[in-house]
Image (tube, rainbow, N blue to C red):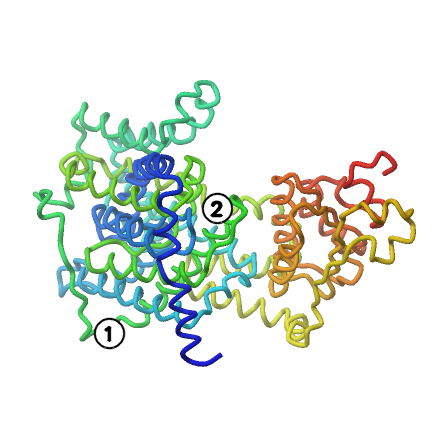
Amino acid sequence: MSAISYIKAVLNEISPRTNITSFSKNIKGDIIAGITVGIIALPLALAFGEISQLGPIAGVWGAIAGGIVGGFFGGCLVGVSGPTAPKAAQIAAYMSFFVIGRTNDPDLVAAFSIIFISGVILVIISFVRISHFIHYTPYPVVAGFMCGIGVIVILTQLNAFVGLEVKKNIHDVIINLSDTIENANIEALYVSLPSLAILFLWPFLGKKYSILNKVPAPLTALVVGTYIAQIFNLDIPYIGDKMGNTDANQIFSIYLPDLSRTISFISPAIALAALAILDSLLSCKVADNITGKRHSSDRETFGQGMANIAAGLFGGVTTATATMRTVANIKFGGKTPLASIVHGLTLLAVLLGLGSLVARIPTACLAAILFKVGIEILDYRIIPVINKLPIKDLIIFCMVLFITVYEDLMVAITLGVIFAVFSSIKDLKNIFKEKNIYAFVDFSDSDYAKDLDTNEKNHRNVKILNPKGSLFFGSVEKLIKSFNQIPNDSPVIIDMKEVPNIDLSGIFGLEDLIKLSQSQNRNVAITNANEEIRNNLIVLKFVENIGSENIGETPFELFHKINNDPRA
């Protein structure tokens, strides 16, 4: 490919044309979904602004930039961007290094310059077209990272939960834990405990009173917590304490990046950009699994770059595609980027019109919301089977988890990936030697068809997918691509007789593939797995999750079963 052709391909890939032309396809549904998600996002944006140490209002500006700019340029049609727990925690970690003189106040120009530069780096990365490598991240790395973020969010909000000053980093929280308990402000618990109770009880109440399902639990907790604080005039910290006498006009500010300090900012900016790719594209993969569509990784990276440039200019917390908001958007009927843009405009209207009300929200209420967010971030797919993980996957998970909590997010991810690569070096070599092959054939053209009569051979459309080589984090994406080439109306048998081993990434990738197919009323089954693989599939609950009837000894047996043949 020539340089000109390459540039044209890149520009075509990152063009917002696809997003803009889709706006008219679901206008009513997108507007309703966008407003609803905007309401849900408000307390989360405020909370992530607080945890970032840039202030609650910065969290809202980050959500506005992510929603509007990310909606125009992003690569996931249903994705909704804004501050996320991992990115807020990461920028907070950097704030201890960038303070003003002896005041120990955060250097806001430095913070927003780093966010701006991270956006520029993301734009550059989108031109290099390497974002798709996110699909090769080992699952134990992702799980350790998510659990580590969950622990960080919970621990860093302990002080705010009991009405005390939030500590700068996780080490201070742990060291001063006894002081936190001794000096707790009881009045703050009058807000934080009821708010937390609402968040946990809301799903159960929704089952009994269906009308409650239309009201977001975080918004309810925010209103109730604020009401309690105002009614009883509680002497606890409020968001307004950090806003001073800020009015709607003062809320709007421009932060020009200090490029003269680029050398100091480049390292944290690169880390933020890398985290944005990981955070965003993992959220996009979740959306892909729900919608059955596939996002554009390079365009999503470009969109996040533009969103972070905007966030840096307007004083917003660094952004990424947010899983919670994206899933909520899909749930409430959002189908195009118009929903994301409406979500951003909703938050802008709230910020400029209701700034005085936002100032009255107690920080203990935001802490309760973040507590729940931290608990939900934990990877509940890996936790129930953690004692049964293969030793290599367990080591990677624990390594990433502890380094994330006690050291640095990107260091944890980097070391986890390096360990995974070196521990799978033989399998990776086979990929480059093209020994990992994923081909499919018609059942009637396979060796197993000799057991069928002529009529069956001519009228059945079952396909057999024949992976060859280890199924692990480096090859599962190739399996998915091969599977997606099979016609949607064809049942599939995955014949694993030439797969010697499988790791956690392979198991979960295969499980996701089958469960998505099942949700689309498509039959997919597995056969000829060796004893070691079958044992792993059982102990890691793969068989339980996809149904034991979808795993058979021979393709012939499954051929009749997935066609609902009574002879099976």
Tag of residue 137: none
Tell me: 103 left or right of 93. Answer: left
Amino acid type of the residue tagged 2 in the rendering: Leu
In the depicted structure, whether residue 143 falls above or below residue 328: below
Front-lying residue, 2 or 308: 2
Q: Residue at x 39, y 23 (%)?
A: 212
Mark 1 lies on a secondary structure that is helix
The percent coordinates of residue 162 (x first, y second) are 29, 38
Q: Which residue is drawn at 43% across and 18% down?
A: 209
Q: In this figure, which residue is indicated by the disc labeled 2?
A: 378
Amino acid type of the residue tagged 1 in the rendering: Thr
Tell me: 468 left or right of 566. Answer: left
Front-lying residue, 285 or 106: 285
The percent coordinates of residue 513 (x first, y second) are 63, 49
Q: In this figure, which residue is indicated by the disc labeled 1?
A: 262
- Looking at the image, is mark 2 or mark 1 earlier in the sequence? 1
Tell me: 472 left or right of 348. Answer: right
Tell me: 561 left or right of 426. Answer: right
The percent coordinates of residue 497 (x first, y second) are 80, 59
Q: Quadrant of residue 164?
A: top left
Q: Which residue is drawn at 19% across and 63% down?
A: 99
Mark 2 lies on a secondary structure that is loop
